[in-house]
Image (tube, rainbow, N blue to C red):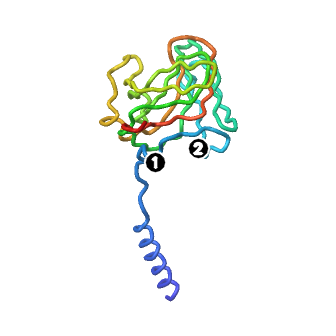
Amino acid sequence: MNVLVLLVGLMAAAGLLWSCAPSLPTVPSSDLETIQFGSEMNNPWRPLNDGVMGGLSEGTVALNDSSMSWKGQTRLENNGGFASVRAPWGNTDLRTMDQVVIRCRGNGGPFKLTLETSQRWWMPYAYASFSPGEEWQDVVLDDFSWSQAQMGDLKSVTPSRELEDVLRVGLMKYDGTAQAFDLEVASIQFVPAGRP
């Protein structure tokens, strides 16, 4: 009987502690201003290529001391043509985003920065294209569009209305060409409006 009373008391105390624990909110952009790549990343990005649909494109990721190196080859056989690298799923509020600054260098562009707002692969995602040079540079992106497979570009993105819940950030090589590519990224910074 005493054991039962003790168990009930412990369960009640655990319930009280659980109810007082804070919930995990969507991360506002002011808290997640920069994704810093490197060997110390807690949640490294992973490749996702057109092999999921029967394509033959390739892409591999390696983490260096202070950057991520993404290399591969897009191929058009079997209706393929894309390679990508993507962050783990999460929830990020980018409504206050005015621009994105990517510290990078590479060959074989153009590339796309993608912002997914659905876990359904056929739904549109926000993207902006960029073509870095071989030397380190800060690429500034401030014009995002919506895209959807087989439907082309749909419309411009208004972050304040449409990017409240970004589930995954990624980089993609998808431009209808079959070619080798190499992109090294040190950081991706989401810059809020009104910040220099």
Q: Of residues 133 and 89, which is closer to you in this image?
A: 133
Give the farthest residue toward the left: 161
Relative horizontal placement of residue 183, taking residue 14 as reference (left or right): right
**Left/right of residue 181 with respect to residue 25 in the rendered view:** right
Query: Is residue 190 found left or right of 54 in the rendered image?
Result: left
User: Looking at the rendering, in which quadrant would you find the C terminus?
Assistant: top left
Q: Amino acid at mark 2?
A: Asn
Q: How many marks?
A: 2
Q: Left or right: 89 with respect to 72? A: left
- Where residue 141 appears, as percent x and y from the top left, is 45, 26
Q: Earlier in the sequence, mark 1 or mark 2?
A: 1
Residue drawn 43% across the image and 76% down it? 12
Q: CA distance from mark 1 to mark 2?
A: 17 Å
Q: Which mark is residue 43?
A: 2
Q: Residue at x 39, y 42 (%)?
A: 93
Going 41% across and 46% down the picture, which residue do you hit? 28
The type of residue carrying mark 1 is Asp
- Reading the image, the residue beneath label 1 is 31
Choose mark 1 or mark 2, whichever is in front: 1
Kind of element beneath mark 1:
loop
Task: Estimate how packed mark 1 is, as few (under 14), some (14 to 19) or many (20 or more) residues with alpha carbons within 10 Å.
Answer: few
The x and y percentages for residue 34 are 51, 40
Q: Position of residue 122 (x, y in %)?
A: 41, 27
Q: Is 176 situated above or below 156?
A: above
Helix, strand or loop at label 2? It is loop
Front residue of 81/158: it is 158
Residue 55 rendering spot, x and y as whole percentages: 57, 18
Tell me, yes or no, whether the two marked residues, 1 and 2, touch with CB atoms within 8 Å.
no
Residue at the image position 54 percent from the left and 37 percent from the top: 87
Quarter of the image holding residue 120?
Answer: top left
